[in-house]
Image (cartoon, rainbow, N blue to C red):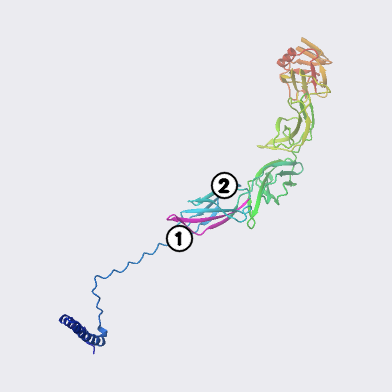
Amino acid sequence: MKRTSKRMIAVLLAVMVILGSYASLGAFAAEDDALNAVAAEVTEDNAADAVEVPEAVGDPEPEPEPEPEPDPDPEVGKPTGLGKTSRACNNITLVWFAANNATGYEIYRCSADYDNGAYRKVGDVAGTTFNDVKLVAGCPYWYRVVPYTVKDGVRYYGTEAQYKTATQPQKLSSLTRARCSDVNEIKWNRVYKCSGYKVLRSSVESGNKEVLVATINGNSTTRYIDKNVRGGYTYTYNVVPIRVLYNNAVFHASGTRIALMAGLCAPNFNISSSLYRVSLNWKYNRYATRYDVYYSTDPNAKAYTPAGSTTSNSFTTGKLSGGKKLYFRVYPIYKGNGKTVTGTAHTKLVTVTGNIYGRNPGSTYIEINIAQQRMWFYKNGKLVVDTPVVTGTRYSMDTPKGFYYIYQRARNTVLTGPGYASPVDYWMAFCGGCGIHDASWRSSFGGNIYTYNGSHGCVNTPYSAVRTIYNNTGYDTPVIVY
């Protein structure tokens, strides 16, 4: 049986005693042999109980401490809910929900029409919104929103979010009336990057609610004819350019509206020039409450210059520059029920001239317009008198039209004729018994008085006006009546 460890300890002590008792090498050698024999016995008999004896060589070295494991890279989530809030033709505003651990977002954009699939960085924001400006109207844009966080000066990125959208098309730059007769026709300029147009209409027939009446596919047709109209009714049209993208997603521009009254059609007017004025006349339109007259040196001008308005079916301008070529338009206007509606107009050209009845009166003359019931007096090219008058009763005692001269002048005289004797302070005869004089028996002048209570052919004039003319004219002063 195996011996106990006490025996092994005793043997070791004995060896130490023997080592201390011998001084010679021979003794050491004999001792070694004895020790070897004893050690072999210990090894053989007590191998199970053997204890390793450490070398007695100073203090043991400490175990090295384990190196610390590096911190892991920060993890960043993905933005969600990416979309747009703007509805504009030149900018897009993106919004999204924050990604986990993100401190910022890089924004990349690709124009599907221009960039050939290449993205470029257009923004870097800390928040969850981005406004992209100076974009092309009606253009598709693709976006990537990449979240990131920063650690030790290094950016760590999360998963990007992608979004496809587009700017709205540009609204119409022009929407005009082409016809207002038994049909209504509108036209407009083509809109860049447009796939087509939607036409909506409202009227009393629809309860003034807009109803889609036409969808025009393509960008070549830029007019709409509405045959379902009634004369005297007002229809408001709203034309909306659209672009169709991304599996028939429709992007709408802002609409442009215009009102038309069926039957408020363009007057076919006559036009002429004399005495440096332009005169126009036309037939009445049954729906018009007035007429607006415009002119321009350019027939295609976007805006014509207003010449004036009238409720009559004729109009004469003020004095214009001689020799100038001008284009005129006469628009019928309806105003009622809280609305003002403009009709269509023809365009006609006239050259301004100072001649009339084949002659030129020079710079000092008297001018009488029967249709307007108005008289002007020019002295040395300067307007001195502009006054309403009453001419001869229409159709029975009309004031004669023509080119005349003052051939008789008188103060404080009595005008006589069949059944009348009228004292006047100023008298200037120009044609037979017709002349220009004051008319103290009248309280008003101008308008349509001459159609039912006109003179016997003379030109009845307010007192102050006739006095000024008398004091600034003489014999042979031209008088032109038209």
Q: Main secondary structure of the magenta part?
A: strand
What amino acid type should be assigned to the residue bearing mark 1?
Glu
- Choose top left, top right, bottom left or bottom right for residue 365: top right
The range drawn in magenta is: 139-163
State yes or no: residue 149 in magenta.
yes
Question: Where residue 418 appears, x then y in whole percent?
Answer: 83, 15
Residue at 75%, 40% in the rendered image: 263
Q: Amino acid at mark 2?
A: Val
Query: Tag count in the figure?
Result: 2
User: Residue 383 at x, y = what percent?
Assistant: 72, 20
Horizontal and vertical percent position of residue 1: 23, 90
Residue 6 falls in image quadrant? bottom left
**Mark carried by residue 133:** 2
Query: Is residue 359 shown in magenta?
Result: no
Task: Give me the disc on residue 75.
Answer: 1
201 or 354, which is in the foreground?
Answer: 354
How far is mark 1 from mark 2, CA to CA?
32 Å
Q: In the image, residue 329 lies at what x, y percent?
A: 75, 34
What is the secondary structure assignment of the residue under circle 2?
loop
Asked whether the viewer can see residue 223, the reply is: yes
In the displayed structure, 86 sits above or below 386; it is below
Residue 256 is labelled as none
Q: Is residue 456 above or below residue 119?
A: above
Q: Residues within 10 Å of mark 1 (few under 14, many from 20)?
A: few
Image quarter of the C terminus: top right
The answer, for residue 233, to whether it is visible in the render is no
Relative height, residue 2 to residue 165 (above, below): below
